[in-house]
Amino acid sequence: MSLINLALRGAEQCARRIEQLEDDFADAWRQNAEDLTGMVRGLEPIQSGAMLANTYTQQLGRFQFQTMVDVPYASFVNDGTRHMAPRHFAEQAVAAITPVAVARLEAVVDDAQSSLRTIVTGS
C-alpha cells in the first residue's frame, strides 16, 4: 500500500502574513485619506484663511476616514451659488487621488500575494 502525505508548508507564517495584511490595508487607507486631504487643500481656491486651516482628515473607524472642510461656507465655494461660479475643488481632488489610492491598495495586495507564494513554495 502506498501513502501520499501532503502538507502545506508555512501555515503559521501564512496566518501571520494575513494578519499583517489587515494592518497594511489600514495604513494604506490612512495614507489615501491624508493624500486626499492634502489634495483638497491644494485645490482650495484661496490658499490662506479659515478654509485652509480647517481642512483635515478625521478617522471614523479602522478603514473609514473622511476629509473635512469645516467652515460653514465650504459647500458654497465648492458647489457655487447664483452669485458665484462653482469651484468643484472636492470633486477634482477625488478624481486626482483615485488612481493613486487604487494603486496603493493594489500594491498591498500584490505584496501579500508575493509573500504568501514565497512562504508556501519556498522560492
Image: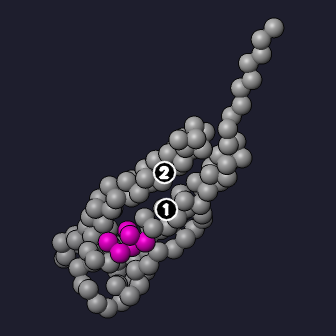
Q: Position of residue 105 (x, y in %)?
A: 45, 54
Which residues are drawn in magenta? 34-39
Question: Based on the displayed image, in which of its 4 quarters is residue 75 positioned?
Answer: bottom left
- Residue located at (62% from left, 51% from top): 17
Q: Position of residue 121 (x, y in %)?
A: 57, 37
- Residue located at (65% from left, 46% from top): 14
Q: Which residue is mark 2?
A: 111
Q: Who is closer to the viewer here, 22 or 39? A: 22
Give the mark toward the camera: 1 or 2. Answer: 2
Q: Quadrant of the N terminus?
A: top right
- Residue located at (73% from left, 18% from top): 4
Question: Based on the displayed image, in which of its 4 quarters is residue 26 positioned?
Answer: bottom right
Q: Who is closer to the viewer here, 21 or 8? A: 8
Residue 29 is labelled as 1
Q: Is residue 6 above or below residue 75?
A: above
| Disc 1 and disc 2 in contact, CB within 8 angstroms | no
Asked whether the viewer can see residue 80, the reply is no
Q: Is residue 61 above or below residue 114?
A: below
Task: Decide whether residue 91 is among the magenta residues.
Answer: no
